[in-house]
Image (spheres, helix red, strand yellow):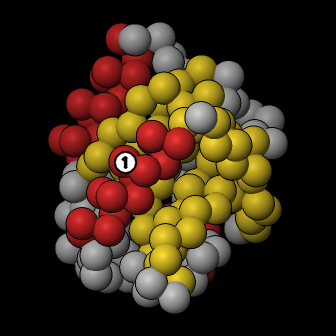
Amino acid sequence: MGFGTLFIAMQSLSLSKEQLQEMTAYVHAHAPLEACGLLAGKNSQVEKIFFVQNQAQSPVRYVMDPIDQLHAFEWIESNDMDLLGIFHSHPAGPETVSPTDIAEAAYAVTYVILACVDSEWRTRGFWIENGEFREVSLQVNE
């Protein structure tokens, strides 16, 4: 199974322009509440996006629905993929990780944050480990 197998921090995460547009449309549709989901694939290339309900129904916090999350994990495992990332939105900014994001980071994956800044959605990736974070390059392909 692909969970926890990426012990070395990812340097970059690749996704298609269409995938980024899907994620942006999803988080925009749920604003002003935070929205969240999972990114699956192989070798740092996103192949599937899972939109997961935010049980917190909050503008500043997300809690993934455990049933949605379980179904995604089962699909990822049965399709021999890895969990590459977790995404969520910051509808009112900031476009970086929050103290809550750092405290609740539970997986060795890229955390993708879509933040609305000046009415425009911006996307950045981060690696969170041991209470610290660093930016991960997001490669958007045609």
Q: Between residue 136 and residue 133, name the one nearer to us.
A: 136
Looking at the image, is 97 positioned above or below residue 126? below
Which quadrant holds residue 123? bottom right
How many numbered markers are drawn? 1
Q: Where does residue 99 sit, x and y in percent of width and height?
A: 59, 80
Identify the residue at image location x=75%, y=52%.
136
Q: Where does residue 58 sit, x and y in percent of width and height?
A: 27, 79
Quadrant where the C terminus is found in the figure: top right
Looking at the image, is 100 positioned above or below residue 66? below
Looking at the image, is 23 positioned above or below residue 16? below
Q: Between residue 106 and residue 12, name the one nearer to us.
A: 12
Number of residues whose C-alpha sits closer than 10 Å to that of mark 1, classed few (under 14), some (14–19) or many (20 or more): some
Which quadrant holds residue 42? top right
Residue beneath label 1, please? 22
Indicate the amino acid at tag 1: Glu
Q: Where does residue 134 sit, x and y in percent of width and height?
A: 79, 62
- Is any part of residue 22 visible from this angle? yes
User: On the picture, is 31 further left or further right than 1?
Assistant: left
Identify the residue at image location x=30%, y=57%.
26
Q: Secondary structure at mark 1?
A: helix
Identify the residue at image location x=36%, y=11%.
78
Identify the residue at image location x=22%, y=41%.
68
Q: Between residue 119 and residue 54, name the one nearer to us.
A: 119
User: On the picture, is 19 further left or further right than 56?
Assistant: right
Which quadrant holds residue 29? bottom left
User: On the picture, is 86 further left or further right than 69?
Assistant: right
- Is any part of residue 100 visible from this angle? no
Q: Where does residue 30 sit, x and y in percent of width and height?
A: 24, 69
Q: Residue furthest front?
A: 142
